[in-house]
Each structure stands twice: as structure tokens, then as C-alpha cells.
Image (spheres, grey):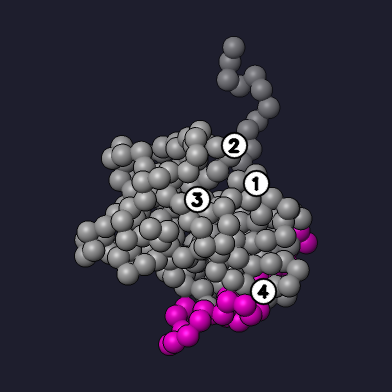
């Protein structure tokens, strides 16, 4: 059978958001006319939109199903001089530090944010638009950076974490963490040295299967039992 017997294969690339200029302008306008700065992870929403981790602007932007862009969380500040990061207040007034991805809960009522530089997972309620910290993975001995997150079908959040200070502290808290409720991170990646946790990249969750990238490989972490009991010393939850 010849390769030319079927219909012609067509590939179409469509620009959805961003005008090619680095910046933060454009909320309330067509997403294609808006400015973005170093956008990273993207995720679909239940209403047909797209969440964008606008890392360079320290914001989460959202493109609705009509193609209009708006800011969902982040004031643009990355690290306040002192005090809280905005928890308990409007998400648009909060400080994010290089967010890497945002995902919705299964019912679409919550948006979880990988607050990369702050080493935490933030939680935004759609109705109240209030933000809170869902889990903090950074500690005195773990300079955690949240590379990616995803939510499973029951609302648990999985976070891929690297430890930027591993050479200093000698503690490896890098790996995959599961967060089933506020302030309850559990280290689920105790699978040994079959890959380097310090080079974790993208992560996805589907039915207990967690494909993730590390170094020059694609791996899959499969969780079939209860939560891991072997938490790295000096990390959150220990």
C-alpha cells in the first residue's frame, strides 16, 4: 500500500495568545494582542479556556473560550520585602515568584498554582477569588523549586520538585509530592536512584500513572499502594 493513497496531511500552527513582545499589557483584550513574558506551563479549563503560567510577569493569565485574556492571580511582585505573600486576600493582589503551571480541580472551582520560586503550591477559589497556600515545600534545609503540578480525578495535587540548595544542605527533598489537603504534602517518589530527581521536568497525572521527564528520558511513576512513609529528613511533614 502506497503512502500517497490517503488524504494529504496538513499541519496548522495557530497563535492563541501573545503578540511576540515581552510585557504585561493586554488584559481585557484579545489574547493575540496581549503581551506575555516567558510563558511556561499551560492547562485547559472546564469552560474551554486556557490557563497560562506567565512566569516572567509573576502572574497566572487566562484566555477564555472567546479568546479574551485576563489575569487570574499575581500582582506582578515576585518577592515582598517582608510579611505574607497575600494569603487570605484577592488573588490579584498576591505575590507569585515565577509560577510554572496552573491547573483546575476536577469540578473547576479551584485553581492550583505551582509557585515555583516560593517553593509552594497556591490555591485560588474561583467564586471568592481569594488565594491561600495549599502546601509549602520549601524549608530551612530544602530550597524547593516547584517545576510542575497536576491534579488527579479526585482533586489531589502532585508536584514535581527540585532542591536548588541540595549541594549546600546535603538533603534531597527533590521528587514527586502528593498533596491531598491543605498543608499535607507526602513524598510519594521513594523509588530509588533510577533517575535523578534533581533534573525533574514536566509531570502529568492520569489514573494513577504519572509520566515525568528527567535528564534525557521520559519515565512513568505508577502508584498502586498507600502514601510513602519514607520522607526525606528535614523536609515539610517530617
Q: Looking at this view, is 58 or 118 the one in front?
A: 118
Residue indicated by mark 4: 130
Range covered by the magenta-colored residues: 65-94
Q: Main secondary structure of the magenta part?
A: loop
Above or below residue 192? Residue 67 is below
Q: Is residue 200 visible?
A: no
Of discs 1 and 2, which sits in the foreground? Answer: 1
Residue at the (65%, 44%) spot, across then down: 153
Residue indicated by mark 3: 178
Question: How far apart, in angstroms, are the residues tagged by discs 4 and 2?
Answer: 29 Å
Image marks 3 and 2: residues in contact by CB distance under 8 Å: no
Relative image position of residue 45 (x, y in whole percent): 69, 55
Residue indicated by mark 2: 207
First in residue order: circle 4 vs circle 2:
4
Relative image position of residue 122 (x, y in whole percent): 55, 66
As drawn, which residue projects farthest toward the bottom? 81
Amino acid at each position: 500500500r502506497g503512502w500517497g493513497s490517503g488524504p494529504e496531511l496538513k499541519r496548522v500552527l495557530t497563535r492563541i495568545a501573545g503578540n511576540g513582545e515581552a510585557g504585561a499589557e493586554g488584559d481585557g483584550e484579545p489574547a493575540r494582542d496581549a503581551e506575555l513574558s516567558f510563558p511556561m506551563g499551560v492547562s485547559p479549563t472546564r469552560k474551554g479556556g486556557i490557563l497560562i503560567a506567565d512566569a516572567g510577569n509573576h502572574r497566572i493569565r487566562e484566555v477564555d473560550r472567546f479568546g479574551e485574556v485576563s489575569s487570574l492571580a499575581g500582582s506582578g511582585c515576585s518577592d515582598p520585602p517582608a510579611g505574607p505573600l497575600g494569603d487570605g486576600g484577592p488573588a490579584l493582589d498576591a505575590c507569585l515568584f515565577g509560577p510554572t503551571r496552573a491547573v483546575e480541580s476536577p469540578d473547576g472551582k479551584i485553581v492550583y498554582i505551582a509557585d515555583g520560586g516560593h517553593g509552594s503550591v497556591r490555591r485560588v477559589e474561583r467564586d471568592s477569588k481569594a488565594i491561600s497556600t495549599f502546601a509549602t515545600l520549601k524549608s530551612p534545609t530544602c530550597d524547593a523549586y516547584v517545576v510542575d503540578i497536576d491534579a488527579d480525578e479526585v482533586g489531589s495535587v502532585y508536584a514535581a520538585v527540585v532542591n536548588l540548595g541540595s549541594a549546600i544542605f546535603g538533603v534531597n527533598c527533590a521528587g514527586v509530592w502528593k498533596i491531598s489537603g491543605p498543608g499535607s504534602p507526602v513524598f510519594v517518589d521513594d523509588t530509588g536512584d533510577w533517575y535523578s530527581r534533581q533534573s525533574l521536568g514536566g509531570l502529568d497525572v492520569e489514573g494513577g500513572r504519572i509520566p515525568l521527564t528527567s535528564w534525557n528520558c521520559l519515565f512513568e511513576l505508577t502508584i498502586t499502594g498507600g502514601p510513602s512513609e519514607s520522607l526525606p529528613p528535614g523536609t515539610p511533614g517530617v
